[in-house]
Image (cartoon, rainbow, N blue to C red):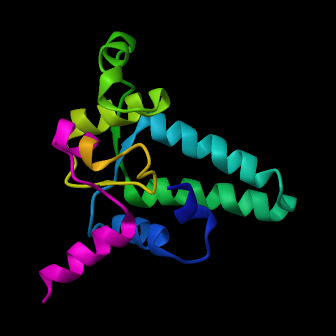
Amino acid sequence: MTAGIVSSWGLDKAVLALCAAKVCRLVLAEVVRDEVEENLLLHAEHLRSIDADQLLEDHRRLIKLTNPELVPYPDKDQVRASRHLIRHVADVPVLLSAMASKPDWLLTHNKKHFTKTVAQRTSLRITTPAEFFRALSALFR
């Protein structure tokens, strides 16, 4: 999500545009929201003040336009008990949030941790934005 906000163009931004246009619904885990906000603040530190302010305003506007379905943090005990589902411990809350919300798609560039095995274990459709758009385009053929 961070790339869709900070990039001037790209598939990440296109996904967010679909959500802002209400073509797709953004399901946003609170754990992801918090990580994105931290990343944006770090990115903003390297910008001129006016550009940093614009970046943060763009993020606020995106959240307002998409009106995401927020998924709360999973319970800490549940996170510990579900550690076996994914290799990287920091991704467990993200994965559990996705499992709880049952989205049509979980879009990520993190294919190192969100693998086909993880998708099979959790019955989630995990893909990159590029794969998402290829699947959408197949519907129109």
Q: Residue furthest bottom?
A: 141
Q: Considering only vertical position in the picture, is 94 above or below 137?
A: above
Quadrant showing the C terminus: bottom left
Using the image as rendered, state which of residue 53 and residue 78 is in the foreground.
78
| Front position in the image: 72 or 134 | 134
Q: Which percent across, then down, holds residue 23? A: 26, 70
Q: Residue at image x 14%, y 86%? A: 140
Residue 38: image quadrant is: top right
Q: Residue at x 36, y 49 (%)?
A: 68
Instruction: Name the foreground residue: 63 vs 111.
Output: 111
Q: Is residue 83 visible?
A: yes
Q: Is residue 90 above or below residue 110?
A: above
Q: Residue at x 65, y 46 (%)?
A: 39
Q: Position of residue 11 (x, y in %)?
A: 45, 73
- Asked where in the image residue 114 lies, by quadrant, the reply is top left
Magenta span includes 121: yes
Q: In this rendering, would 130 be left or right of 140?
A: right
Counting from the top left corner in percent of width and height, residue 122 is at: 20, 37
Q: Is residue 20 visible?
A: no
Magenta span: chief secondary structure:
helix
**Image-based side of 16 in relation to 131, left or right:** right
Where residue 28 sits: x, y (%)? 38, 45
Nearest the viewer among 93 and 62 is 93
The residue shown at (21%, 46%) is 124
The span shown in magenta is 118-141
Q: How many marks?
A: 0
Q: Residue furthest right?
A: 48
